Image: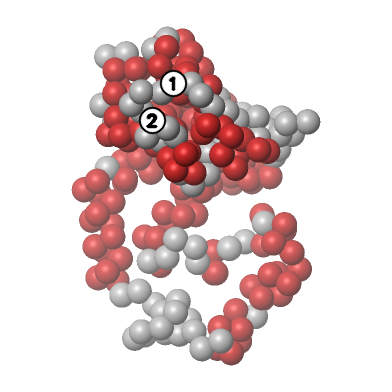
Amino acid sequence: MNLYEELCKDYRFREGLHTCINCGTCTAICPAAEFYRYDPRKIVDIVQRKNEGEIEALLKSDTIWYCGECMSCSTRCPRTNTPGLVIMALRAMSIRHGYFTASEKGRQVYPLTKMLTGNILNYGYCVYPETFDWKYHQESGPVFKWHLEHLKDDFERIGANYQGTGPGVLRKIPQADRDELKAIFDETGATDQINLVEMCSKAKAEEMGMTMEEYRKHTLEYNSGNDFDK
C-alpha cells in the first residue's frame, strides 16, 4: 500500500477532502497562514497530486505541525472541504511511520504527548497545575510563576476544590475513573500511539547524542527561527 492509499483509509481525510478547486480561500481565512510559512491550499494540492515523494516529504516537514486545528477553513470553503481534517490525517500518518522526528516541530510531539496524556491518565485533566514547569514556559510571565508557587492558597481563595474529594473545580479524580480512561486509550489505539511516539523519540535522541531529558528540553526550547514569514 502506498502513502496516498493509506491516507484514503483515514476517515478524516475522506471527510475533509472532496472536490478542491484550489481557490485559496482556506489560506485566506487561516490564522496560522497569517504568521507561519504555512499554506493549507498547497498542502491539499500536494495530496491531490498523489505523488509519493511529495507526500513523504510533507510527512517529514514542519509544515503539517503549524495548523491549530481551529477548522476556520471548514467555515469558508465553497466546496465544503476541511483542510484541517486532512492535516490531522497527515499528522497521524507521520507518527505511524516515525517521520515526525525528522522535523523541528514534529519532534515536539514527544513532550506534548508526555505532558498531556500523562496528565489525563494520572490526574484526569489535560492540563494540571502540579505538572506545569515554569522553567520550560517562562513566556507565561512572573505573575504565573508566583501563582504556581502559591497554588493551594490561590485556589482556596477562588473556591476551587483543589485535590479534594467530592465535586468542585480541580477536584481529585477517582482512580476508577482514571482506570476507565486508560481502558479507552487501550481500546482506541491511543496507548499504542503513545508507545510509538516514545520509541521513535528515543531513537532520535540517541541519534542526536542526547538523553531523553535533554531531548525533551531541546524540543521545548529550540527554535530555528525558520517558521515565520519575514
At which x and y percent is residue 73?
48, 38
Distance Cα–Cα, label 2 vs label 1: 8 Å
At which x and y percent is residue 91?
43, 33
Q: In the picture, which quadrant includes the N terminus? A: top left
Taking the spot 36% from the left edge, 28% from the top edge, the residue there is 17
Q: Amino acid at mark 1?
A: Ile
Q: Secondary structure at mark 1?
A: loop
Q: Which residue is mark 2?
A: 79
Q: In the picture, which quadrant includes the C terminus? A: top right
Nearest to the observer: residue 156 or residue 85: 85
Relative to 173, 29 lies left or right: right
Residue 165 can be seen, yes or no: yes
Around disc 2, counting alpha carbons within 10 Å, would you say few (fewer than 14), some (14 to 19), or many (20 or more)? few
Say whether disc 2 or disc 1 marks the residue closer to the N-terminus. Answer: 1
Q: Which residue is mark 1?
A: 21
Q: Secondary structure at mark 2?
A: loop
Q: Which quarter of the picture shows residue 48?
A: top left
- State yes or no: discs 2 and 1 in contact (Cβ < 8 Å): yes
